[in-house]
Image (cartoon, helix red, strand yellow):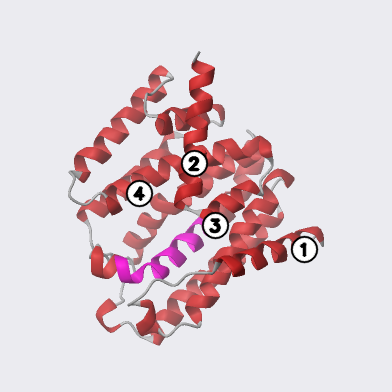
């Protein structure tokens, strides 16, 4: 039965989320059960694409990402793929009317990671972030609003700013690997060989403004989504503060993390804030 295969596919996406990101998995668990499945399916798709370009060294990444794209569109057309991640994602795309321009923008940014190592202008930087992060936020928003186009358009800008904030925090956290392992520099006008406190402050100020705008959008989210999104927001804000308090030379030589103990405290903090209707 196709229904059984779909259920297995959904479980695969959930497993991918839990194994690749305990923090995001926790945030998804704080969403209403009615929308968790689709967020797991979105994460599985974007995680596999990201893994192809970032982690599969020694393999033909260009062929892999192109085949991944081709198989996705076959799944979208036929309604099935023997790749359970693609099978799950195409179900979510159809059920939530996720437009193809969002998927295409995402895949374009993933492919850029294969050929582009530096972003020299704000326009290039903004385009990459839109495709790699903003559209993922918009895909999730499609799930959150359950087909309400008016609500979607109302929250669209804030959802994109939250995606941008998350991605920029990731860039700063992953500075060591991006620079030394992948030979990438996403920040225009920043020389990673002489990364200093002024450069770090400018990046953090930019991210804080994204977070400020995004929080206003979280307040307007449907009840089913609000606590889960706020949980992710609180985690990334904590990570940003930790990066802010870390000397710039250390960010360039090690990956900054939030401990599991701190994550538990953040979850409690977000729950109290949510219950007090402060968000």
Q: Is residue 143 left or right of residue 192?
A: right
Q: Which mark is residue 165?
A: none
Asked if disc 4 and disc 1 are in contact, CB closer than 8 Å, the reply is no
Above-or-below relation of 252 to 38: below
Q: Position of residue 174 (x, y in %)?
A: 37, 67
Asked if disc 3 and disc 1 are in contact, CB closer than 8 Å, the reply is no
Q: CA distance from mark 2 to mark 4?
A: 16 Å
Q: Which mark is residue 23?
A: 3
Instruction: For label 3, count other residues whose C-alpha is less than 10 Å away and answer few (under 14), some (14-19) or many (20+).
Output: some
Q: Kindly state the secondary structure of the residue where label 4 is placed.
A: helix
Question: Does the magenta segment cover residue 260?
Answer: no
Q: CA distance from mark 2 to mark 3?
A: 13 Å
Q: Earlier in the sequence, mark 4 or mark 1?
A: 4
**Residue at image location 52% in from the left, 54% down from the top:** 22
Q: Earlier in the sequence, mark 3 or mark 4?
A: 3
Q: Which residue is mark 4?
A: 50
Magenta residues (range): 160-177
Report the mark closest to the observer, 2 or 4.
2
Q: Earlier in the sequence, mark 3 or mark 1?
A: 3
Q: Kindly state the secondary structure of the residue where label 2 is placed.
A: helix
Above-or-below relation of 222 to 234: above
Asked if disc 2 and disc 4 are in contact, CB closer than 8 Å, the reply is no
Asked if disc 3 and disc 4 are in contact, CB closer than 8 Å, the reply is no
Quadrant hosting residue 78 = top left
Q: CA distance from mark 3 to mark 1?
A: 18 Å
Above-or-below relation of 213 to 55: below
Q: Kindly state the secondary structure of the residue where label 1 is placed.
A: helix
Q: Position of residue 178 (x, y in %)?
A: 30, 65
Q: Which residue is mark 2?
A: 15
Q: Which residue is mark 1?
A: 272
């Amino acid at each position: 039965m196709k229904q059984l295969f779909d259920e297995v596919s959904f479980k695969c996406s959930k497993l991918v989320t839990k194994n690749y990101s305990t923090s995001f998995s926790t945030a998804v668990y704080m969403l209403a059960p009615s929308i968790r499945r689709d967020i797991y399916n979105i994460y599985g798709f974007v995680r596999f694409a990201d893994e192809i370009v970032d982690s599969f060294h020694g393999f033909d990444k260009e062929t892999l990402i192109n085949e991944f794209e081709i198989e996705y569109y076959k799944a979208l057309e036929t309604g099935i793929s023997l790749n359970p991640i693609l099978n799950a994602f195409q179900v979510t795309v159809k059920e939530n009317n996720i437009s193809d321009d969002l998927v295409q923008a995402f895949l374009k940014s993933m492919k850029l990671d294969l050929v582009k190592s530096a972003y020299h202008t704000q326009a290039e930087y903004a385009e990459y972030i839109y495709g790699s992060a903003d559209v993922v936020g918009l895909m999730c928003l499609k799930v959150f609003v359950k087909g309400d186009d008016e609500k979607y358009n109302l929250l669209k800008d804030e959802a994109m700013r939250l995606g941008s904030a998350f991605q920029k925090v990731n860039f700063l956290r992953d500075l060591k690997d991006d620079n030394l392992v992948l030979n990438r520099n996403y920040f225009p006008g920043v020389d990673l060989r002489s990364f200093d406190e002024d450069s770090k402050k400018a990046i953090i100020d930019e991210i804080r403004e994204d977070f400020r705008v995004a929080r206003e959008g979280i307040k307007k989210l449907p009840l089913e989504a609000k606590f889960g999104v706020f949980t992710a927001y609180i985690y990334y804000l904590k990570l940003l503060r930790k990066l802010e308090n870390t000397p710039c030379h250390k960010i360039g030589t090690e990956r900054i993390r939030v401990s599991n103990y701190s994550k538990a405290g953040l979850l409690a903090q977000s729950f109290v804030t949510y219950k007090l209707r402060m968000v």
